[in-house]
Image (cartoon, helix red, strand yellow):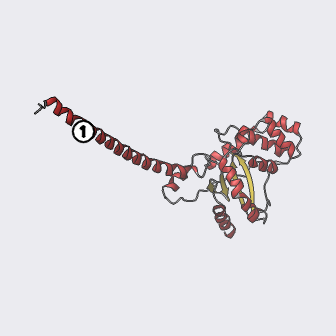
Amino acid sequence: MPKVSERNISSVFAKPMQLLLIRFMYVALLISFLVIGYLLGQLQALNGGTTNKVAAGTGGADPAAGAAAAGAPAAPVFADVDNGNLPVKGDENAPVTMVEFSDFECPFCGQFYTNALPEIISEYVDTGKLKIYYRHLPLSFHPQARPAALASECANEQNKFWDYHDLLFENNSTIGTATTDKYVEWATSLGLNGDQFRTCLESEKYAENIDGDNSAATAAGASGTPTFYINGQQIVGAQPFASFKAIIDAELEG
């Protein structure tokens, strides 16, 4: 009968033990990845929900958004805001006034222009119930916001503010790459004197108007764009038409 050494016996059991250990480590590692992935997913869901609620409304930080996201009822905010220097849109004798602080490069302002504003104009401006005034609040992280605001003031010099306002917002998605030549091109497409417009824009002739609107926005508590004041009542962000309708109707009934 052949002699079996201790070394042979060890080698017989060593390989199965090694395989078992490797399988155990693999299973443990897999479980660890699953647990870590679950925890990261939960954390991302919590952070993402808060971020989306805040970012969905305004182009800048707004303290009221945090309270709304937490489910706290937001009390109406009122401010005494004047109409600024730009021409009115609508009947000057309309009973309700809306002052808008906005930024031509702000995507949320572009959303308001596309989604809610046409219905507001149709239902309230064209029927003589509401008048709108535009004021500038170019945000510092939008490089073309201030040049676009200055360009709109130069268009106003030639009595084309609202036409130029519409043209800027129709190009809201690409305005971040606009140049002086592009602003002049848009002006001439509306029939404005290009040389006069260029001189006005390059000299920043109406910079004081922009600065004055910025100061008025700060005094009224407008920190993001767009921010509106309907007979003094603040409404923040690219809200749906129904949000504006509720306030305007209440003012008309009051």
**Measured from the top left, where is residue 21 in percent x and y?**
26, 38
Q: Nearer the viewer, residue 176 or 147?
A: 176
Judge whether 9 appears above or below 238 on screen.
Answer: above
Res. 196 image quadrant = top right
Q: Where, quadrant-wise, is the C terminus in this rendering?
A: bottom right
Q: Write the residue at 80% across / 47% down.
A: 164
Q: Is residue 135 left or right of residue 197?
A: left
- Residue assigned mark 1: 16
Judge whether 230 appears above or below 250 on screen.
Answer: above
Q: Where, quadrant-wise, is the N terminus in this rendering?
A: top left
**Measured from the top left, where is residue 46 in percent x and y?**
46, 50
Q: Write the residue at 26% across / 40% down.
A: 20
In this view, which residue lies farthest toward the bottom? 253
| Disc 1 packing (10 Å; few <14; some 14–19; many ≥20) | few
**Measured from the top left, where is residue 211 in percent x and y?**
70, 40
Q: Write the residue at 38% across / 46% down.
A: 34
Q: Amino acid at mark 1?
A: Pro
Q: Nearer the viewer, residue 163 or 98?
A: 163
Judge whether 7 appears above or below 193 on screen.
Answer: above
Q: Nearer the viewer, residue 242 or 94?
A: 242
- Label 1, secondary structure: give it: helix
**Measured from the top left, where is residue 160 in percent x and y?**
84, 48
